[in-house]
C-alpha cells in the first residue's frame, strides 16, 4: 500500500519549535482541583493551623500541602517559600480581623463610644472563636525577638494598637472604662478576650465546654464587656 505523505502544513508544524516562556515570565500554575482562589485559601487556612501548632521551625510545607489536599508545587508557585507562606497566612488572617473591626466601627459610629467599643470587642471575640489558631500563633511569635515578630508589629500590631488606644482613651474620658494605663488595658482586653480560645483544648478538658461554639463566644463577649466596664463604676 502506498504510504500517505504528510501535508506541508503538518511537516511545518512538526518542525516548529516548542514555545517557551520569555525570561521573567511566570509559568502557568499546575492544574488545580477546584477554583484557584479556593485552593489558595485552603492552603493559607491550613498553614495558619500548622504554624500555630508546630511553630515556624517545626512546620513543614510538605505537611501543609498534604493536609490542604494540594500539590506541594503550588506552595512554591503561590508563595515562593515557607517564609512567604507564613507571611501570607498571617496577612490573610489579619485582613479578616480588620474587616470585622472596620464593619463594627462603621455600623455603630452613630451609637456612641460605649456601644461602638462593645461591638468591636464582640466581633473580635467571635473572630478568635472561629480562628483560635490565630491567637496561638500570635502568642508564640510575640514571645521572641526576631524578624517575624518585628514584621508582625510594624505591619499589623502597632496600627491596631494605636486604633484601640484611641478608643480606650475615649472610653476612659467618657467614664465607662477604668482609668488605668491604656497599654495595660490593651493587654488585659487581649488576654480576657482571647486566652480561652487559644487554650480551647484545656478548657474542653477541664470544663467539658467548647469555647469555640458561637453561643459560648457570645456569652463570653457579654462577660468580658461586663467585666471591663464594671471596673469603671
Image (cartoon, rainbow, N blue to C red):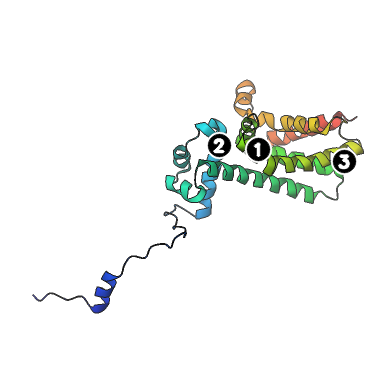
Residue at the image point whose x is 72% and y is 36% from the top: 218
On the image, the x and y values in percent for residue 15 come to: 27, 70
On the image, the x and y values in percent for residue 112 come to: 87, 45
Tell me, for residue 170, which label it has, or none: 3
**Label 1 Cα neighbours within 10 Å, binned few <14 / some 14-19 / many ≥20:** some
**Towards the viewer: 3 or 112:** 3
Q: Which quadrant would residue 55 be assigned to in this image?
A: top right
Q: Which quadrant would residue 113 be assigned to in this image?
A: top right
Tell me, for residue 49, which label it has, or none: 2
Alpha carbon distance from label 2 to label 3? 36 Å
**Label 3 Cα neighbours within 10 Å, binned few <14 / some 14-19 / many ≥20:** some
Tell me, for residue 150, which label it has, or none: 1
Secondary structure type for disc 2: helix
Secondary structure type for disc 1: helix
Q: Quadrant of the N terminus?
A: bottom left
Sequence-earlier tag: 1 or 2: 2
Q: Quadrant of the C terminus?
A: top right
Alpha carbon distance from label 3 to label 1? 28 Å
On the image, the x and y values in percent for residue 224 come to: 77, 32
* Label 1 with label 2: CB-CB less than 8 Å: no
Q: Is 173 left or right of 26, judged from the image as shown?
A: right
**Label 2 Cα neighbours within 10 Å, binned few <14 / some 14-19 / many ≥20:** many
Note whether residue 79 is visible: yes
Tell me, for residue 68, which label it has, or none: none
Q: Which quadrant would residue 138 be assigned to in this image?
A: top right
Note whether residue 210 is visible: no
Amino acid at each position: 500500500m502506498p504510504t500517505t505523505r504528510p501535508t506541508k502544513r503538518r511537516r511545518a508544524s512538526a518542525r516548529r519549535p516548542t514555545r517557551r516562556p520569555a525570561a521573567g515570565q511566570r509559568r502557568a500554575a499546575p492544574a488545580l482541583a477546584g477554583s484557584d482562589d479556593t485552593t489558595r485559601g485552603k492552603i493559607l487556612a491550613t498553614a495558619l493551623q500548622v504554624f500555630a501548632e508546630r511553630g515556624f521551625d517545626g512546620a513543614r510545607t510538605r505537611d501543609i500541602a498534604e493536609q490542604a489536599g494540594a500539590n506541594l508545587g503550588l506552595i512554591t508557585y503561590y508563595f515562593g517559600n515557607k517564609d512567604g507562606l507564613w507571611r501570607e497566612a498571617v496577612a490573610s488572617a489579619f485582613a479578616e480581623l480588620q474587616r470585622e473591626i472596620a464593619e463594627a466601627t462603621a455600623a455603630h459610629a452613630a451609637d456612641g463610644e460605649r456601644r461602638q467599643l462593645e461591638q468591636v470587642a464582640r466581633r473580635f471575640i467571635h473572630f478568635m472563636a472561629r480562628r483560635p489558631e490565630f491567637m496561638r500563633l500570635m502568642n508564640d511569635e510575640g514571645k521572641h525577638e526576631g524578624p517575624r515578630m518585628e514584621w508582625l508589629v510594624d505591619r499589623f500590631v502597632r496600627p491596631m494598637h494605636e486604633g484601640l488606644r484611641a478608643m480606650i482613651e475615649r472610653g476612659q474620658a467618657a467614664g465607662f472604662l477604668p482609668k488605668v494605663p491604656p497599654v495595660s488595658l490593651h493587654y488585659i482586653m487581649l488576654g480576657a478576650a482571647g486566652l480561652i480560645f487559644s487554650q480551647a483544648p484545656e478548657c474542653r478538658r477541664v470544663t467539658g465546654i467548647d469555647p469555640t461554639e458561637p453561643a459560648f463566644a457570645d456569652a463570653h463577649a457579654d462577660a468580658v464587656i461586663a467585666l471591663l466596664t464594671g471596673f469603671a463604676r
